[in-house]
Amino acid sequence: MTVTVSHGFRPAERPQVAALFWQAFSAKLHKVMGPDEKGLEFFELALNPDFALVARDPAGRMLGLAGFKTQDGGLAGGSMSDLARVYGWFGAVWRGLVLSVLERDLQPGVFQMDGIFVQAEARGQGIGTTLLSAIKAEAQRMSMTQVQLDVIDTNPRARALYEREGFRPVKQEQTGPFKHLFGFNSATKMSWAVTRD
């Protein structure tokens, strides 16, 4: 199957992208962003197509998506007013505080991956590898020095993919008391040095 990767997604695809995102991250985010209908509603508002690379089949159907983050923003954006629209102001405030634990400061020259997810029926067909290659090419195009991502200890399959693609662990962070909230004990920061042609 021929797969093409392009920037962004269409407004009509927001529900599909939100469903893919929630499918990939609800285990980690459910206690904070649940129930499911609320999480889906929020991410349908918050996901920013300007920070997405989308893999499609020859008919244009979305197979998967990789998000990224730069100094200008990221895929998983959203404002306090977006949170309040879905959860009310009280719910927005405490959720915003808890979610800040997951935030990563961007370093100059670093292209931060902001999630990668593939449709269930398209898994095992190299879509994740194709999206990672597109992320590397985008970082190169933007003259970044490295691509970084975080992988949690409960996702060894993703870590194995990243290692096969040349990513190396550089730091591990424990979640401490938040492990019961997010469902994982640690996250490993992995890095890939951008090569120049």
Image (cartoon, rainbow, N blue to C red):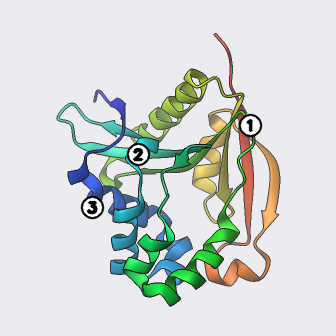
Sequence-first tag of 3 and 2: 3
Disc 1 to disc 2, how far (Cα)?
24 Å
**Please, what secondary structure does the residue beneath circle 2 have?**
strand
From mark 1 to mark 3, how far is it between C-alphas? 33 Å
Identity, as a three-letter code, of the amino acid under mark 3: Pro
Amino acid tagged 1: Pro
Residue depth check, mark 1 versus mark 2: number of the one nearer the observer? 1
* Left or right of residue 90, residue 179 in this image: right
Q: Which residue is mark 2?
A: 65
Q: Residue at x 46, y 62 (%)?
A: 24
Image height check: is 73 above or below 93?
above
**Residue 63 in picture, x, y percent from top left:** 32, 44
Near mark 1 (Cα within 10 A), the count class, few <14, some 14-19 or many ≥20, is few
Cα–Cα gap, marks 3 and 2:
13 Å
Decide which of tag 1 and tag 3 comes sooner along the chain. Answer: 3
Is the C terminus in the top left, top right, bottom left or bottom right quadrant? Answer: top right
Residue drawn at point x = 53 percent, y = 36 percent: 132
Q: Label 3's element?
A: helix
Q: Quadrant of the N terminus?
A: top left
In the structure shown, which secondary structural element does the residue marked by tag 1 occupy? loop
Please state which of residues 65 and 8 is positioned toward the viewer in this rendering: 8
Task: Say whether disc 1 or disc 2 marks the residue closer to the N-terminus.
Answer: 2
Left or right: residue 150 versus residue 125 is right
Asked if the residues shown at circle 1 and circle 3 are in contact, with their CB atoms under 8 angstroms apart, the answer is no
Quadrant of the image occupied by residue 43: bottom left
The image shows residue 160, relative to residue 120, as above or below, that is: above
> Label 2 is placed on what type of residue?
Leu
Q: Which residue is mark 3?
A: 15
Q: Position of residue 129 (x, y in %)?
A: 50, 36
Residue position for label 1: 108
Instruction: For label 3, count other residues whose C-alpha is less than 10 Å away and answer few (under 14), some (14-19) or many (20+).
Output: some
Q: Quadrant of residue 146?
A: top right
